[in-house]
Image: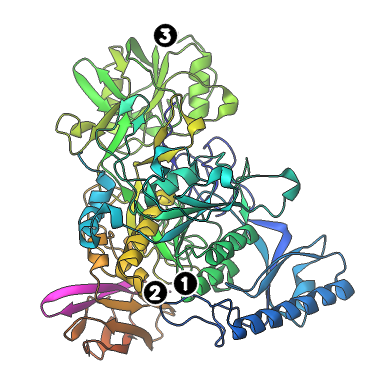
Amino acid sequence: MRRIRLALAVAAAALIAAAAPVGAISPQRISAQSDSPSAGATVDTAYALVQLRGAPLSTDVKTKPAPGKKIDFNNGATKALRAQLSALRNDFKQWLRTNAPKAQVTGSWDISLNAVSVKLNGTSLDQLAIAPQVTHVEYEGLYHPDVATVDPDLTLINALNAWTQVGGNANAGKGVKVAIVDTGIDVSNPCFKDTDFPTTTQLGDNHFTNNKVIVAKVFSNKTPSRGYSAAPVQEHGTHVAGTVACDFNTAATVSGASIPYGISGVAPAAQLGNYNIFPGDVTNARSEDILNALEAAYLDDMGVANLSLGGGAHGIQDLLTIAVDNLDLAHMVVAVAAGNSGDGEPAAHPPLPAGHYTVESPGSAARALTAGAFTVGHSVRSLVKQGTTYYASEDGEFAVPSVDLTGMTVQALGGSPAELVDGHLDGCTTYSSSVTDKLVLVARGVCTFAEKVYFAQAAGAAGVIIVNRDPTPIPMADDPALGNTIPAVMVGLADGLALYASIPTNATITAPLYVSLDDPLTAAFAPEKNVQSSFSSQGPTDVDFRVKPDVMAPGENVLSSIPAAFCASPPCFAFFAGTSMATPHLAGSAAVVKGAHPTWDAWQIRSAIVNTADQDVIKSATDGTTIVTDVNIVGAGRENLFSAVKASVFLDPVSVSFGAVPSRSGQTKTFALAVTNTAATAATLSIVGSGTGIAFRVSPASVEAGATATVTVTATFDKAAAAGDHQAQLNITVGTAQVAHAAVYAFVK
């Protein structure tokens, strides 16, 4: 069975079928596979994270690393601080024994956070908060996976030219180690052959390592008795890892259809670490498992970490986001998914547009390299044929015929095309008559895709064609518990209405074939490219209203590796969708940039990727043609790895956000931005754009060659400033060429 899924970046564990309840991260998240909100807990109320007084190693003035360096754990000051922090933890444990004897410390950290995890055993957060050693307490969050002659997604981000810039694919990411904090990596997949990699010390369980995947560790502190290993039981992590660093030019087949090019990761020369936080059938990782994995990755000298996961954002005191920020300050780039909550979500803060305010944690971290998703113009899909007319379709997790399923009469349940649009032909109940050996045409809506197929199968149908309410079809999720075996595909709205109008003409669902916008013979059936994925979470962030995501990367129709257990004839490959799939494009890009510029700090690498992005190329998910300029949807734009490798001006932070401003306040606000110019000539700064009743300006207007300057961006709000979003753009030029740009944003409430 072909597996094309919306990999929930809001879920760094296995992708979860739409018919099944999803362990929630965002209370009102709507998956693009499902027609109803997901449900479940966003926190584990049995456990807490407790931040203690005193800075961690990553930020303490005595131990934070010098620019371009990492923490020196052999340094006397580092050892002394670790001893002090350990003593503080012991004091806290003693306080617990006296004041909250049921509570038990289960883990601790001193690199990214000075914190411990506590099994509460009935102790309240308020009880812990009064301890003299404590500065902040929160329940542990639950996270789950937030899925041509050349690889087309690499073309979209200009990776091939970037490889040329660094000396070819054999040098793309060479010498850089990337931590995949996910569901494990199947080293048997040809994406992870280690033939061209040096003999490397392998850490953890060497049953799951080689000289390319050099670490295999498991993190599930709540269930140690289950004896979980780092084995990649679920698909998500192997897919993510392949996007980061699949070996160059790896042959692939999906559902019997040969892919006409060799696939490659963004950084094929990078080495990987498997930090499995979703072992076995675990689909929710707690905050402490993620923290343990991140600190282990840092200690294992990983230069980049990939977090294709997400959970409920808890504002500026969210400890996992603070940890991500601190690891960036300690010079490890952390790429994080924005989340998959952008599809149809109501705005939490009117008058923000629907879909805004849905970015998830830890993608909401100020210093995370946060990925939004857009489409790639290829797929493996069956087509629906009626007469001489073909229609594009998607199946997702449902069966597709190995040979053409032909000669079947299309039958609907009754009604008119208008009712089809309204969802009246929904197929969500037991059929009153037999549809034996027919293809049943039903509308999307009311119940899950799996239930529609179940009822049609029970009535004897040979297959199901589901009509989307939008112009293009999407991959659909099955529910294994229902036992569906018949083929099922989705077509777009106009195609579905055309099929409906032709009833009872015979139709065919074809065997899968590779379709691509680059192939004139199949381009008409390929998905569009550079279209904003409707599920991609949007900013601004919770509480402080910052721009997120930072930048867009390919995240829909992404082809990569999956474990051997997930196809009939390994090696296995599949198309997935989700900001989970966009994130490893950024992690791989960070590895390429870091490999080319090993002395650059983490913030410089982030800035290089974000602030050189291509603008005015991402199109609206609504109509597929309108260019999206809203910075809370696209951030700085579509990443351009070639431009990132050549970056000469760096910004910290990567965007300018003034937060929420009360309406009719008539105030003036300033924002300090560090600008480093490594070019041979001065850089000129200017701001383009303003909102109704608001003006932006920047001072000074230039930064000398080889200098770093603090630049002040000022926003002046009239009392008549309109409520809602206001944005502009900071442009930086050297000579006549624009070399960097940054989003400027304010929200009038």
Residue at numbered disc 1: 328
Q: Main secondary structure of the magenta part?
A: strand
Q: Please tell me which of labels 1 and 2 falls first in the chain.
A: 1
In the rendered structure, which segment of residues is drawn in magenta?
Answer: 725-749
* Residue 435 in the image, given as x and y percentages of width and height: 44, 10
Residue 343 in sight? no
Give the quarter of the figure containing the C terminus.
bottom left
For the point 28% across and 32% down, which residue is it?
Answer: 259
Q: Which secondary structure lies at badge 2?
A: helix
Q: Residues within 10 Å of mark 1 (few under 14, many from 20)?
A: many
Query: Contact (CB < 8 A) between labels 1 and 3?
Result: no
Judging depth in this view, the residue of 613 and 441 nearest the camera is 613
Q: Please tell me which of labels 1 and 3 falls first in the chain.
A: 1
Q: Is residue 610 left or right of residue 561?
A: left
Query: Residue 643: within the magenta?
Result: no
Does 3 sit above or below residue 335? above
Query: Residue 740: within the magenta?
Result: yes
Give the quarter of the figure containing the N terminus.
top left
Q: Which secondary structure lies at badge 1?
A: helix
Q: Which secondary structure lies at badge 3?
A: loop
Judging depth in this view, the residue of 392 and 432 nearest the camera is 392
Residue at numbered disc 2: 603
Residue at numbered disc 3: 437
Does 556 sit above or below residue 121? above
* Residue 436 in the image, given as x and y percentages of width and height: 45, 8
- Residue 381 appears in which quarter of the rendering? top left
Does 685 sit above or below residue 409? below
Looking at numbered disc 1 in the image, what kind of residue is underneath it?
Answer: Asp
